[in-house]
Image (cartoon, grey):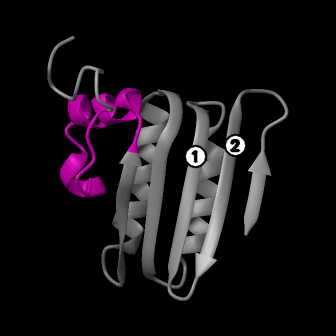
């Protein structure tokens, strides 16, 4: 297991390596200040192909830089593997929905938490 924490902002990445599957759990703000750290880690993880599962359940903020890092990884994996979002906070799910990147990022049954506005609700 790999654990990366940013000392400057509320941001944390935990990587669980199991066989041919890597699970990346992101917590905190995924923005222009932290997306590069995630992108570099994902670039390293996708080098061998396979499957990368991403858990965004702990993401409290996400901007275009965060989406860009995830989409870049998904495109790099496309020939020999896949990236799948297996969990997303309401904030992350809404940003993915609003940017239209859900098909590329493969949201596997991900929706907003109960009681929270879901993606595309306009609330």
Identify the residue at horizontal 60%, vertical 39% (top origin).
Answer: 27
N-term-proximal mark, 2 vs 1: 2
Label 2 element class: strand
The numbered mark at residue 12 is 2
Identify the residue at horizontal 37%, vertical 56% (top origin).
Answer: 86
Quarter of image, res 82: bottom left
Q: Residue furthest right?
A: 7
Q: Specify start and end residues of the magenta stretch as a single range.
A: 88-112
Check residue 68 for magenta coloring: no
Q: Residue furthest left?
A: 121
Reading the image, the residue beneath label 1 is 26
- Give the quarter of the figure containing the N terminus: bottom right
When the figure is inspected, residue 94 is found, relative to residue 117, above or below; the finding is: below
Task: Give 18 or 31, whichever is nearer the viewer.
Answer: 18
On the picture, is 30 further left or further right than 123? right
Count of marks, rendered view = 2
When the figure is inspected, residue 56 is found, relative to residue 39, above or below; the finding is: above
- Residues under numbered marks 2 and 1 in contact, where contact means CB atoms less than 8 Å apart: yes
Label 1 element class: strand
How far across and how far down the image is residue 61, in percent? 50, 25
Is residue 44 among what the camera can see? yes
Quarter of image, res 122: top left
How far across and how far down the image is residue 34, in percent? 65, 37
- Give the quarter of the figure containing the C terminus: top left
When the figure is inspected, residue 79 is found, relative to residue 36, above or below; the finding is: below
């Amino acid at each position: 297991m790999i654990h990366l924490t940013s000392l400057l902002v509320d941001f944390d990445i935990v990587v669980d390596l199991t066989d041919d599957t890597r699970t990346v759990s992101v917590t905190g703000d995924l923005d222009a200040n932290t997306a590069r750290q995630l992108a570099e880690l994902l670039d390293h993880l996708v080098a061998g192909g396979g499957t990368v599962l991403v858990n965004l359940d702990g993401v409290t903020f996400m901007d275009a830089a965060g989406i860009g890092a995830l989409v870049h990884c998904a495109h790099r994996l496309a020939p020999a593997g896949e990236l799948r979002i297996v969990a997303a906070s309401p904030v992350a799910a809404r940003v993915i929905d609003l940017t239209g990147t859900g098909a590329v990022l493969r949201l596997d049954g991900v929706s907003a938490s109960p009681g929270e506005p879901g993606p595309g609700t306009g609330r």
